[in-house]
Image (tube, rainbow, N blue to C red):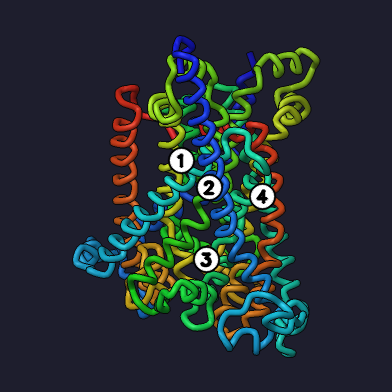
Amino acid sequence: MSAHEPARERVRGIAMSGLKADLYRVLKYAALIAWAIFVVAPFLWALSTSFKSDPGVVGGATYIPFLEYEPTVDGWTALFRDTSSGGISMQGPYLSSLVVSLISTSIALFLGTLAAYGLSRFTFRAGPLGNNDITFFFISQRIMPPAVLAIPYFLLLRFTGLLDTHLGLILVYVAMLLPIVVWVMVDFFNTVPIELDEAALIDGCNPIQAFYRIILPNCAPGMVVATLLCIIFSWSDFFFALTLTFAKVQLLPPTIVILNSNKVPWWSLSASALVSVLPLVIIAFVLERYLARGTLAGVIRE
Amino acid sequence: MLDSRYKHIFLLPALLALVAIIIFPLIYTVRLSLSGWDVNFPELDYIGWDNYARAITDGRFWDSMGTLYLMVLFCIVFEYLLGFGLALLLWKDVRAGRFFRVLFIVPMCVTPVVMAVVWRTIFHETLGPLNDVLSWFGIPAVPWLSKSGPAFAAVVIIDVWQWTSFMFILLLAGLMSLPREPYEAAQIDGAGPIRTFVHVTFPLMAPITLGALIIRLIESSKLMETIYALTSGGPGSSTETTSYLLYIRGLREFQIGYTASLSIIYLAIMIIALTIFARSMSRLMIGRQGPVRV
């Protein structure tokens, strides 16, 4: 609207746009709320189901406790009970998942940040290939479908006696996570001025000390994002856990999927699903903080 | 300058780890694909190109590729449109913006296969809530998991539920990093919201959009876990993706040599398709500024 318009025209224009703005606002919140309902629906359904017993399930879908079905905590206590007494004893798989994802995340972070720092600060040449090509080589490993690697992994782990061990799975996860760490961290190190490194060197650090004492603390947000992504990916992996472990090592996702095919009642199935994704929901809260600070923006620009 | 004698200490451990854990197994797969290794004959012999000749005429393999690409197409189109729409809505200040943002990020964080188990109860024909809710609107029960069309739709719905959040987070982060000046210029020119979107936001977002699309394309082409838990590739083989077929042929039926050859063909086609997609999309969206590195 230009300021040269007659006053009446302008007033009508503002009134129109006021009405339009209201309509827009209503539609906007309607859309946001609709999507929010779609997002939480599976969780609410699982939560409701986890308190049900037979009558609440076999007669068709019910939603509201007390009103439509008599709630019980049987689904939740089954998580801790032994399989012999109708439970699913989740503690073992939970602990295994925790150990495997924390160790593989730590190793991937250690190796990945070192490499990312190297790629950000030094010039590498290998024939016609330079730093960008090496970075791309790291990231491009995400293209590899797990199904393609499953067979050689299976044979190689069997050959080395690492099939169905935590160590074997951790090795595989490190390869899966390394590209993610390098992807996030190269960009972060690029935003930290090289003068900082040089100041540390003048103060008598060697390059490795400069990296640990000065640069890493300055890249804490990037480390947090990389860590969270690694935990999400390793905690959620199903394919490698399914194909490379069987009896001795039991991680969460395969345990729950096997319950699904074993005719375990819906209530304990729902409770186990909720418990296994709970840590990840907490991660979502932290990730949003870093998104709001603009921490992720640089990563995606790459 | 930093002392470059140290540089290999930084890079080499990760590089060697990656070569050992990914490149070496890949080369081993190529070797396996030239062998007749199976359940009855678990030896690394040499049979030449027989496996590849058999793969060319394997209808189920090519069907699985068709299913995969159709699924990926549906998923990515919906995820992009919804994710971008939601990101635009939450870009400017919104009441309870943080609440919505956290909520919209949750699906990409939770374990896909575990959610697929929950979704299976939701899609249950007689006891599930979805058909119940549909019946409130007078829609007859849909045989979600026992007919091929609805089963395909169910997989797409779950994928859209889970990964729209990923498009959303990438595109929102992109929107938040856009420079202010072009918007001020557009305002001075008197451009309305639609013209501003078409001429400023969309072009500025093109590189980020392209990056997000390619990442999703790569990740969604691995689609297998949801199918394992939800439909087992069925009914028939209507939801069987290539990854799922590779799993069945390789680690259930132990046709190691043959599956290795399918893997190599699949990987080659994927890389070619991705390259063509990235090139043509970058030309389409960014014009002649050259290809974007992802």
Q: Which residue is mark 2?
A: B166
Residues at marks 4 and 3, common chain?
yes
Q: Which residue is mark 3?
A: A159
- Rendering coords of residue A142 (x, y %): 47, 47
Badge 2 marks a residue whose secondary structure is helix
Please identify the quarter of the rendering in which residue A152 is found.
bottom left
- Rendering coords of residue A80 (x, y %): 77, 78
- The Cα atoms of the two marked residues, 4 and 3, are separated by 39 Å
Given this view, does label 4 or label 3 mark the residue nearer the observer? 4
Badge 1 marks a residue whose secondary structure is helix
- The Cα atoms of the two marked residues, 1 and 4, are separated by 19 Å
- Tell me what residue is drawn at x 27 percent, y 70 percent: B60
Residues at marks 2 and 1, common chain?
yes
Q: Which residue is mark 1?
A: B212
Crowd tier of the residue under label 1, counting other residues whose Cα lies within 10 Å: few below 14, some 14–19, many 20 or above: many
Label whose residue precedes the other's in the sequence (4 or 3): 3
* Residues at discs 2 and 4 in contact (Cβ within 8 Å): no
Q: Nearer the viewer, residue B263 or B49?
A: B263
| Chain to which the residue tagged by mark 4 belongs | A
Q: Amino acid at mark 2?
A: Phe
- Is any atom of residue B16 visible in this view? no
- Tell me what residue is drawn at x 50 percent, y 33 percent: A135
Which disc number belongs to residue A284? 4
Q: Amino acid at mark 4?
A: Ala
Q: Residue furthest right?
A: A203
* Residues at discs 2 and 1 in contact (Cβ within 8 Å): yes
Given this view, does label 3 or label 2 mark the residue nearer the observer? 2
Q: Residue furthest top?
A: A4
Q: How many marks?
A: 4
Crowd tier of the residue under label 2, counting other residues whose Cα lies within 10 Å: few below 14, some 14–19, many 20 or above: many
- Rendering coords of residue B286 (x, y %): 35, 27
